[in-house]
Image (tube, coloured by chain):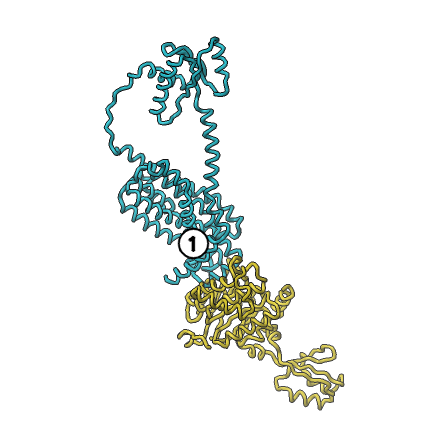
Chain colours: A yellow, B cyan
C-alpha cells in the first residue's frame, strides 16, 4: 500500500532537494556546493569514498547540522527537523542504549518520531518477528550480536512508517545474508512509495538498488543522474581476439586500443559495430572472439570520480 | 511547542525509567544514609571524648553538708546557663592526711581532676590549674553561702518580641537554604554526566535527527528532577532523622517563618525545583561539552566550588533581607532561589516571591536555550561558517578595502 506524501512534495515530485550546500568545519571545507534532487519514491544512492562528504551531506539534509550556506528542502520543509516525524534515519555510527530491551529500543525510536509508545511496541513485535528476532525482543541490546543490534536499529528507523528513509552506509558490518535482506527491505519500502536515500562506498549495492545516484568526490557532486546515464557516459568496450596478428584490418583499430594478454581492448567506435566488423572481415583479421561489453557503474565511477577516488575506496574496502 | 514538550517527555520518560529502575538507584537512595551514619558514629565518639576531656572536674574535699549546698548551687547555675559548660564537682570525704589526699587527687586520671577544693564553705581553698573554673567556683560558693541572694524578679512572658523573632526566623531561613544546598549538591554530579551516555554510545545522532536539541535538554533535566523527587520522597518517608527531630521538638522548635509554615514549605518545594533547574541547566550545558567520564570528573570540582560560592552569596540574605547584598543575591539567577527562601522566612510579602519565581523561570528557559545552541555548535559542529569576530573582521576588511 502506497504511503501518502504531502501536497508540496507531490507537486514538486522531489522528496529531497539541495542547492549549493556548503559546510565548513573551522578552516576545512567538508562539503563544497552540493546540489541534489531526489525524486519521491526513488532509491537514490550517494556514492563516494570515505571523507568525500557523504555523511556530512546527509547530516545536513536531515537537520542534525546546519549548512554554512546553501538551501535544503526535505519533504517540502525548509527546516528538516519539521519533517522529522516522516523521516527514518540510520546513522553511520550505530548507537543504542545498551541496557534497553530490543523491543523497547525500537518503540523508543518510534516515539522520538511521534509514534505512540504502545503502538511502537506492537509494531516492534511484528517487525522483530518478520526479521526472525522475536525471541530477542525482551533481551537487552548488550546481549545481541553486532548484526542483530544493527538490524534492531534499522527497524527503529522504519517503525513509524516514514516517507523518507535515510541510511548512512547501511551495509557496513552486515554479513552477506543480512545485506541481501536489507536490499530486499529497501526495495519493499520503495514499492510502498517510500523514498530511500542511502550512502555507500560499495558500488555493487548502488548498481543493484539505485534508480538514481550522485557521485561525490572531494566535497562536490561529480555526477547526478540515473545509473544508466552514468554508464552511458562511457562507450562500450570491445574485446577482440584474432588469428592474424597483422594485416590490413589493423587500420580499423582505434588509436587507444591496448593489448590485454592475447586480446585487443578498445572503446567501440562512435559509428557502431557494423563498420568495425566489416573492416575486420575484409582486412583478413580472422576473428576468433569478439565481445562488446556494456560498462558497469564501477567503470563509470572511475571515469567520473577519477582513479584517485577509486584508489581510496579500494583501500577502505580492503580494510573493512 | 506541543512537539517540543512531547519529545521532551519521550526523552524524560526514558531517562527517568533508566535511572529509577536501575540497581544503581538503590545506592543513590542510600546516599544520605552514609553521611548520617558517619555523623552519628563520629559525633557520638566525639561527644564522649569531649564530655570526658572538656568538662573540668573539681574535686571537693569538704564535709558532706557543705558539699550538698555547693552541689545545689552548681546545679542551679548549670540550669540557668542551658547546658553550657559548668565545672563538674566530685565529692571526696576528707582523709586523715589531707595534703597526701590533695596530691593524689591532682594526679588522678579517672576522673581527670583540674583542681581540688579543700576547707569548707566558710573557708574554701582552691588548689590546681587556674582558669575560668576559678571564677565559676567563686560564683557557686557565693550562691551556696546565701541562697536568699537570688533577686526576686517578676516575669511577664509574651509570645514573641521583634528582636527574638527576627533572629529566630533568620535561623529558619538559614536551615531552609542549607537543605536546598545539600539536596542540589548531591545532584549536580549526576546532571553533569547526563549526556555522556548518549555521546559515548552514539545514539545522540538518532536523537538529534529526530527531536529538537531543546527537547533533549528539557527531557533530561526534568527526568533528573523527577528522579530526585522520588529520592526525596523516599528519604523523607524513611526519615528516621525527621521523626527524631519531631520527637525532640526539632522542627516544632523552629520559629514560624514570616509567610507561615504551609506557604514556606510550598515555597521550599518550588525553590528546590527552580534551584535544581537553574543549576541543572547550567551544569547540563557544561557537562554536555565533556566527551568522557574523566572530563566530567575533572569538571566536578570547580562546579562544586561554584555551588559553595553561590551558597555563600545567598547566605548574605539571611538576617538582612533588604540589604544590597541580599537583593543582589535575589536578582542573580543562580542564588535567587536560596535568597528568596530565606526572605520567605523573614518577610511576609508575596509580591517579591512571585516576581522571583517568574524571573527564575525565565532564566531556566534562557540557560536551556543557550545550552542547546552551544551543544549544537560545539558538539554537533553545527552553525554558522565562521566565528562572529572573524565575520566582523572580514566585514571590516571589506569595508576598509572599499
Q: Is residue B388 above or below residue B312?
A: below
Q: Which chain carries label 1?
A: B
Between A32 and B151, the residue placed more toward the observer is B151
Q: Could you tell me which residue is drawn at 48 percent across and 55 percent down? A: B18
- Residue B107 percent location from the top left of the image: 50, 16
Question: Is residue A152 found left or right of B130 in the rendered image?
Answer: right
- Residue B175 percent location from the top left of the image: 37, 39
- Residue A254 percent location from the top left of the image: 67, 82
User: Residue tagged by mark 1?
Assistant: B223
Label 1: how many residues lie within 10 Å, few (<14), some (14-19) or many (20+)?
many
Between A56 and A34, the residue placed more toward the observer is A56
- Residue B219 percent location from the top left of the image: 42, 56
Q: Can residue B250 be seen in this view?
A: yes
**Which image quadrant is residue A291 in?**
bottom right
Q: Is residue A269 above or below residue A313?
A: below
Question: Is residue A256 found left or right of B55 in the rendered image?
Answer: right
Q: In the picture, which quadrant includes the C terminus of chain B?
A: bottom left
Q: In the picture, which quadrant includes the N terminus of chain B?
A: bottom left
Q: In this view, does B342 lie above or below A199?
A: above
Q: Is residue A151 above or below residue A1?
A: above
Between B205 and B99, the residue placed more toward the observer is B99
Amino acid at each position: 500500500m502506497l504511503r501518502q506524501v504531502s501536497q508540496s512534495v507531490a507537486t514538486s515530485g522531489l522528496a529531497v532537494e539541495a542547492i549549493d550546500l556548503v559546510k565548513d568545519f573551522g578552516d576545512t571545507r567538508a562539503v563544497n556546493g552540493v546540489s541534489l534532487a531526489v525524486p519521491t519514491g526513488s532509491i537514490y544512492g550517494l556514492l563516494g569514498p570515505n571523507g568525500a562528504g557523504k555523511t556530512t551531506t546527509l547530516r545536513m539534509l536531515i537537520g542534525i547540522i546546519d549548512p554554512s550556506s546553501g538551501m535544503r528542502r526535505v519533504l517540502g520543509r525548509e527546516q528538516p527537523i519539521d519533517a522529522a516525524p516522516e523521516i527514518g534515519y540510520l546513522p553511520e555510527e550505530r548507537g543504542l542504549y545498551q541496557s534497553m530491551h530490543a523491543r523497547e529500543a525500537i518503540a523508543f525510536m518510534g516515539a522520538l518520531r511521534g509514534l505512540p509508545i504502545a503502538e511502537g511496541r506492537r509494531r516492534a513485535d511484528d517487525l522483530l518477528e518478520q526479521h526472525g528476532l522475536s525471541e530477542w525482543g525482551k533481551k537487552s541490546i548488550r546481549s545481541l550480536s553486532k548484526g542483530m543490534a544493527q538490524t534492531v536499529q534499522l527497524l527503529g528507523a522504519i517503525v513509524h512508517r516514514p516517507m523518507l528513509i535515510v541510511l548512512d552506509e547501511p551495509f557496513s558490518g552486515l554479513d552477506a545474508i543480512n545485506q541481501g535482506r536489507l536490499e530486499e527491505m529497501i526495495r519493499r519500502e520503495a514499492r510502498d512509495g517510500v523514498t530511500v536515500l542511502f550512502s555507500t562506498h560499495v558500488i555493487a549495492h548502488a548498481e543493484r538498488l539505485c534508480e538514481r545516484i550522485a557521485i561525490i568526490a572531494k566535497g562536490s557532486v561529480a555526477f547526478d543522474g540515473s545509473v544508466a546515464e552514468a554508464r552511458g557516459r562511457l562507450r562500450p568496450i570491445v574485446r577482440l581476439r584474432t588469428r592474424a596478428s597483422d594485416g590490413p584490418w589493423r587500420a580499423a583499430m582505434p588509436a587507444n586500443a591496448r593489448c590485454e594478454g592475447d586480446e585487443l581492448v578498445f572503446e567501440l567506435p562512435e559509428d557502431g559495430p557494423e563498420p568495425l566488423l566489416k573492416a575486420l572481415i575484409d582486412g583478413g583479421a580472422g576473428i576468433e572472439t569478439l565481445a562488446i561489453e556494456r560498462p558497469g557503474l564501477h567503470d563509470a565511477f572511475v571515469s567520473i570520480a577519477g582513479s584517485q577516488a577509486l584508489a581510496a575506496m579500494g583501500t577502505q574496502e580492503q580494510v573493512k | 511547542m506541543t512537539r517540543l514538550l512531547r519529545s521532551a517527555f519521550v526523552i524524560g520518560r526514558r531517562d527517568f525509567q533508566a535511572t529509577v529502575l536501575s540497581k544503581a538507584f538503590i545506592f543513590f537512595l542510600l546516599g544520605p544514609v552514609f553521611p548520617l551514619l558517619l555523623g552519628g558514629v563520629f559525633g557520638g565518639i566525639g561527644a564522649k571524648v569531649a564530655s570526658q576531656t572538656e568538662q573540668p572536674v573539681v574535686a571537693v574535699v569538704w564535709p558532706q553538708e557543705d558539699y550538698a549546698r555547693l552541689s545545689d548551687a552548681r546545679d542551679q547555675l548549670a540550669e540557668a546557663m542551658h547546658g553550657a559548660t559548668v565545672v563538674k564537682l566530685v565529692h571526696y570525704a576528707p582523709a586523715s592526711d589531707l595534703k597526701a589526699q590533695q596530691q593524689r587527687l591532682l594526679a588522678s586520671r579517672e576522673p581527670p581532676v583540674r583542681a581540688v577544693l579543700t576547707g569548707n564553705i566558710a573557708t574554701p581553698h582552691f588548689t590546681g590549674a587556674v582558669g575560668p573554673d576559678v571564677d565559676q567556683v567563686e560564683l557557686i560558693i557565693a550562691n551556696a553561702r546565701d541562697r536568699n541572694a537570688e533577686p526576686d524578679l517578676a516575669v511577664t512572658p509574651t509570645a514573641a518580641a521583634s528582636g527574638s523573632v527576627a533572629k529566630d526566623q533568620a535561623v529558619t531561613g538559614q536551615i531552609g537554604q542549607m537543605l536546598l544546598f545539600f539536596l542540589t549538591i548531591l545532584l549536580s554530579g549526576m546532571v553533569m554526566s547526563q549526556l555522556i551516555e548518549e555521546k559515548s554510545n552514539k545514539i545522540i545522532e538518532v536523537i538529534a535527527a529526530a527531536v529538537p536539541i531543546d527537547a533533549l535538554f528539557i527531557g533530561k533535566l526534568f527526568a533528573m528532577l523527577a528522579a530526585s523527587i522520588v529520592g526525596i520522597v523516599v528519604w523523607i518517608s524513611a526519615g528516621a532523622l525527621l521523626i527524631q527531630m519531631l520527637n525532640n521538638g526539632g522542627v516544632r522548635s523552629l520559629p514560624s517563618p514570616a509567610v507561615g509554615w504551609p506557604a514556606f514549605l510550598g515555597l521550599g518545594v518550588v525553590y528546590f525545583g527552580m534551584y535544581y533547574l537553574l543549576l541543572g541547566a547550567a551544569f547540563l550545558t557544561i557537562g554536555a561539552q565533556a566527551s568522557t567520564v574523566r572530563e566530567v570528573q575533572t569538571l566536578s570540582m570547580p562546579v562544586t566550588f561554584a555551588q559553595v560560592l553561590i551558597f555563600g552569596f545567598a547566605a548574605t540574605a539571611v538576617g538582612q533581607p533588604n540589604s544590597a547584598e541580599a537583593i543582589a543575591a535575589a536578582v542573580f539567577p543562580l542564588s535567587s532561589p536560596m535568597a528568596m527562601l530565606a526572605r520567605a522566612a523573614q518577610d511576609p510579602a508575596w509580591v517579591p516571591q512571585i516576581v522571583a519565581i517568574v524571573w527564575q523561570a525565565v532564566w531556566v528557559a534562557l540557560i536551556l536555550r543557550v545550552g542547546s545552541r552551544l551543544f549544537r555548535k560545539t558538539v554537533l559542529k553545527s552553525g554558522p561558517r565562521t566565528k562572529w569576530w572573524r565575520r566582523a573582521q572580514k566585514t571590516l576588511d571589506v569595508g576598509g578595502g572599499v
